[in-house]
Amino acid sequence: EQLRRQLAEQLGGPEISGDLAVSMDNLGRLAEHTGDLAAAQAAFAESLTTRRRLRELLGTPDSLRDLAISLDNVGRVAEAGADWPAAERAYAEVAQLLDVVASTAHSPAAEQEAADAARELAEFRARRPGGDVEVSGAVGPEPPAG
């Protein structure tokens, strides 16, 4: 994995960066599955940082959808760790991104994903402690300006 990160830093292309994000998501899922939430959170955070950079670089519906996947992973681990505000921010951003994708892609599949994300956010708000109070703010590190 260290070699993959070094190559991604050296080459810096979107394809390599995308591969790195996928690898970090896979590592995060493995850590989550074994109950190591701290390792899962770290892996998903790295993937999220990469996905945010790719969104800025590419700005395509696919890059927005990939970012939503990374945010959903972050939200799931935050929820498992009872970090309700972080989970809500992640899930809310997922819903927002998929709504943008649906409005630009104009496909039934994208519209269904957006509807599912909105429903899942509402379900999360109903089940978390504190009920239906909304939390604002973006999740995770933003890429540096410039």
Image: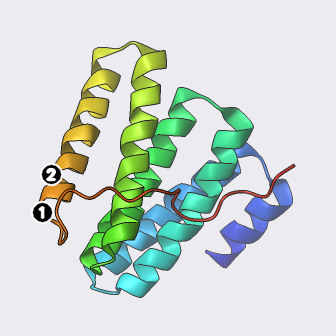
Pointer 1 with pointer 2, Cβ within 8 A: yes
Instruction: Report the Cα–Cα distance between label 1 and label 2.
Output: 6 Å
Q: In the image, what residue occupies the spot 63% across and 64% down?
A: 141
- From what the image shows, is residue 49 above or below residue 92? below
Q: In the image, what residue occupies the spot 31% across and 32% down?
A: 114
Residue 67 visible, this orientation: yes
Q: Is residue 88 or residue 58 the one in the foreground? A: 88
Label 1, secondary structure: give it.
helix
Q: Quadrant of the N terminus?
A: bottom right
Instruction: Residue type at mark 2: give it.
Output: Glu
Among the 4 quarters of the image, the one containing residue 101: top left
Among the 4 quarters of the image, the one containing residue 87: bottom left
Within 10 Å of disc 2 (Cα), the crowding (few <14, some 14-19, many 20+) is few
Q: In the image, what residue occupies the spot 46% across and 28% down?
A: 100
- Which residue, given by chain and number where applicable, does mark 2 sit on? 123
Instruction: Residue type at mark 1: give it.
Output: Arg
- Which residue, given by chain and number where applicable, does mark 1 sit on? 127
